Image (spheres, grey):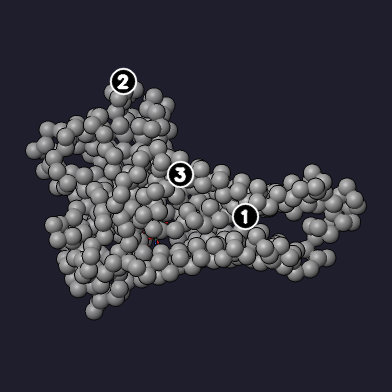
Amino acid sequence: MAAYGAGFRVWSVPLLTIAVPLGFVVWAFPHGLAPLRAAGIVTGWLGCGLLLVSLLLMLREPRLANWLGGLERMYRWHHVTGVAAYVFLLLHPLALAAGNWQTSWVLAWHTLSPVEESWPVWSGWLGLLLLMIGLAATFAPSIRYGAWRWLHALLGIGVVIGLVHLILLGIDEPVLPILAIAAAILGWRLLRGDLGLGARPYIVATARKLTARSVEIVLRPLADPVTLSTGQFVLVAFRNGPVYRGCGEFHPFTISSIDGDGALHLAVKALGDCTSRMLSIEPGVAARVIGGFGSFLSEVSGAPQLWIAGGIGVTPFVALLNDGRLRHPARLLYLYRREDDATYLRELRQIAATDPNLTLQTIVTGDELPDIEGLLPDARELSGVECYLCEPPGLVGALKQVLSARGVAAQHIHFENFEFR
Ligand SMILES: Cc1cc2nc3c(=O)[nH]c(=O)nc-3n(C[C@H](O)[C@H](O)[C@H](O)COP(=O)(O)OP(=O)(O)OC[C@H]3O[C@@H](n4cnc5c(N)ncnc54)[C@H](O)[C@@H]3O)c2cc1C
């Protein structure tokens, strides 16, 4: 996969986020209108532009993800642009109503009231309502993932209805191409990301229990293998086998090592419904693979490193170690609930015993959150160290806070959240 400059990857998404909405405003600027009415129209176009960027950022295409700094980064900006779009779209009718208020309050009320209006306005409100439900679901971590996905999909329907609202208002000339682009992005995501059109065919060659709740699955390619670099992850969906019943959905898993023939090793920890079923996966089960994604460990520098892994978040580090001996000192803090629950612990101890560059520190946390303050090295020890974190999002957030309080600059803290929402 082509490597793009770090600068390009850092700036690509912010530039897109600014350029697309501003481009819309310049293209459709309402000259000669009263300021509030013009503001109402401009906020509508800013919202449309941000929504389009937000849609683009949910595509699961390896090449696009490489250009835009990785899937995890795209997801973060997908949320930011989605929320910003919603705010502008909410301001849009309010500014229009405020503009009409100067003529008469009845006209202002008519602009806002869905009761007294017609299809064009109802469709606008319906679009906003669906966006609101979808966004509320995004920020409700307690909702089950399956339900969350359905509620989140309302955002896509809200976008289409919002654009239909513009067409019903008679603004079809600039809107039709935008509607076509939005529909193309949504269709692309559905066909390629969710239904897996274009995913590469693999087959389960072996499945070996690592712990009571984790399994190592080796996937052999049946055609050209996916292109990967160390520590990247892929999206994998398994088909049903003679006994195994899969969920059919694509789930992200990190590749812990790659064989010469392109076979992929992944460690799966049973954390929910689909991954629990994978514990009993059998050789011969067909799999579909999309990837590779992630740039978390792709630019490991020569500086001393601190790696912090929570549970199954250890897999990217195992991948790096499997790739060859370390050329720089690295200290791995490996946090897990119980010893018999810790994936690849035996392998890591063996590597640490023979490789002087690796220092392994294991921390048994039980079911409690660990004492992060006490766990991390002090500011003096952290000076000049690159930090790499991989664990559930709550823990990543807490670790980042303590590291920055101890003087580690943001550009020296690299992380991967093992969760996509
Ligand atoms: C970049 C990345 C790398 C990962 N690498 C590994 C790994 O090497 N080994 C491993 O065991 N786990 C890994 N995970 C976590 C793994 O993907 C989830 O544990 C798994 O998808 C849970 O699915 P479930 O249906 O069993 O659980 P659920 O109870 O349905 O979900 C638990 C959580 O997993 C996430 N999740 C569920 N389904 C999906 C999906 N289809 N796509 C994205 N996220 C989903 C959601 O955040 C959800 O809240 C990784 C996750 C990410 C984001």
Taking 206 as reference, is 252 left or right? right
Seen from this angle, which residue lies furthest left?
A: 354
Q: Residue at x 80, y 47 (%)?
A: 32
Residue 408 picture location, percent across and down: 37, 27
Ligand 1, seen in the image, is in the quarter at bottom left
For the point 25% across and 29% down, which residue is it? 303
Decide: is 413 above or below 145.
Answer: above
Up-down: is 410 above or below 118? Answer: above
Label 3 sits on a secondary structure element that is helix
Location of residue 290 in the rendering, given as x and y in whole percent from the top left corner = 32, 62
Q: Is residue 342 visible?
A: no
Residue identified by numbered label 3: 12
Name which of mark 3 and mark 1 comes first in the sequence: 3
Circle 1: residue type: Cys
Of badges 2 and 1, the one in the foreground is 1
Look at the numbered disc 1 and say if its residue's Cβ is closer than 8 Å to ligand 1: no
Mark sitting earlier along the chain (3/2): 3
Query: Badge 2 is on which residue?
Result: 380
Residue bearing the label numbered 1? 48
Q: Residue at position x 52%, y 50% from top?
A: 79
Find the distance from the CA under tag 3 to the CA under tag 1.
Answer: 19 Å
Q: Is residue 167 above or below residue 373?
A: below
* Neighbour tally class for label 3: few under 14, some 14-19, many 20 plus, Cα within 10 Å: few
Asked if one can make out residue 225 in the rendered structure from this viewpoint, the answer is yes
